[in-house]
């Protein structure tokens, strides 16, 4: 059995146990148990990604459900949600939630990694690829970086060539349900190959820029790039 298959089997087993043990009271409250499992962590460290890197980045542990990580929430209303796509583009535009749903939808299982040390494997997100949003805006050749704009002035910066990868998206559903407000709903960014602070919650805009513009956490000591496999957690960390 491949190590990746063993990880998937352990994940399925742990999630079944989690659901069975949660009980009706937790279900009624909309809560999920979040726990790390040493056996799963060992298997995950042995598993490899298609690019040859270990599935679990160094310094991470696997947990069984997406963990809310705070931040100042934006408006939870889908009816009021707007997305502005602008900057180094020839066709800037604005979308409401209904227009976002009218675009091509994708559903993907993604591994996500938080700078605080937890990872969740096969997190299921549904939404619109950032590349499709960019294509509609008609990027100029001068565009080099993407700035995700969120509620209350929060921003996160990602190099353009990485942001346009097929796994990166704006998600409005998670695990088959509307994205919870605590996880960034109604819509959040998902950039799974960078630490999760780059996956901006309560997103309101995508701005394409010619020059890099470090975001909220990057200007407060976090690493500008945030590659989990290089442990780029802080600006004084590994390069």
Image (cartoon, rainbow, N blue to C red):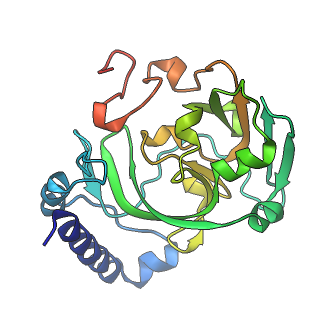
Which residue: 65% across, 32% down? Answer: 147
Q: Position of residue 189 (x, y in %)?
A: 59, 48
Which sits in the foreground, 152 or 129? Answer: 129
Q: Position of residue 227 (x, y in %)?
A: 38, 34
Query: Could you say which quadrant of the image residue 199 lies in?
Result: top right
Side of 52 where 198 appears, left or right: right
Which residue: 26% across, 43% down? Answer: 57
Whether residue 67 is situated above or below residue 142 in the rendered picture: below
Whether residue 192 is situated above or below residue 128 in the rendered picture: above
**Residue lying furthest front:** 141
Whether residue 28 is situated above or below residue 151 in the rendered picture: below
Query: Could you say which quadrant of the image residue 157 lies in?
Result: top right
Whether residue 138 is situated above or below residue 102 in the rendered picture: above
Which sits in the foreground, 169 or 197? Answer: 169
User: Which image quarter holds the C terminus?
Assistant: top left
Q: How many marks?
A: 0
**Residue lying furthest top:** 236
Which sits in the foreground, 224 or 115? Answer: 224
User: Which image quarter holds the N terminus?
Assistant: bottom left
Which sits in the foreground, 49 or 191? Answer: 49
Query: Could you say which quadrant of the image residue 92 lies in?
Result: top right
Which residue: 28% across, 76% down? Answer: 12
Side of 26 where 178 appears, left or right: right
Q: Position of residue 169 (x, y in %)?
A: 59, 53
Which residue: 70% across, 40% down? Answer: 151
């Amino acid at each position: 059995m491949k190590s990746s298959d063993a990880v998937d089997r352990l994940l399925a087993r742990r999630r079944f146990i989690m659901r069975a043990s949660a009980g009706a009271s937790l279900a009624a409250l909309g809560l999920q148990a979040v726990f790390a499992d040493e056996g799963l962590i060992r298997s995950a460290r042995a598993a490899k990604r298609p690019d040859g890197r270990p599935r679990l980045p160094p310094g991470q542990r696997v947990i069984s459900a997406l963990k809310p990580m705070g931040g100042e929430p934006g408006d939870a209303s889908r009816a009021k949600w707007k997305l502005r796509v602008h900057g180094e583009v020839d066709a800037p535009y604005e979308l409401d939630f209904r227009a976002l749903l009218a675009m091509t939808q994708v559903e993907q299982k993604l591994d996500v990694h938080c700078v605080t040390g937890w990872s969740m494997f096969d997190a299921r997100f549904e939404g619109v690829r950032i590349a499709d949003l960019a294509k509609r805006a008609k990027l100029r050749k001068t565009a080099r970086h993407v700035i995700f704009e969120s509620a209350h002035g929060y921003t996160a910066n990602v190099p353009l060539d990485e942001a346009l990868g097929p796994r990166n998206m704006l998600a409005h559903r998670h695990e088959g349900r509307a994205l919870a407000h605590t996880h960034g709903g109604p819509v959040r960014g998902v950039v799974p190959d960078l630490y999760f602070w780059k996956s901006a919650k309560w997103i309101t805009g995508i701005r394409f820029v010619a020059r890099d513009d470090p975001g909220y956490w990057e200007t407060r000591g976090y690493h500008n790039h945030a590659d989990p496999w290089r442990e780029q957690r802080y600006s004084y960390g590994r390069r």
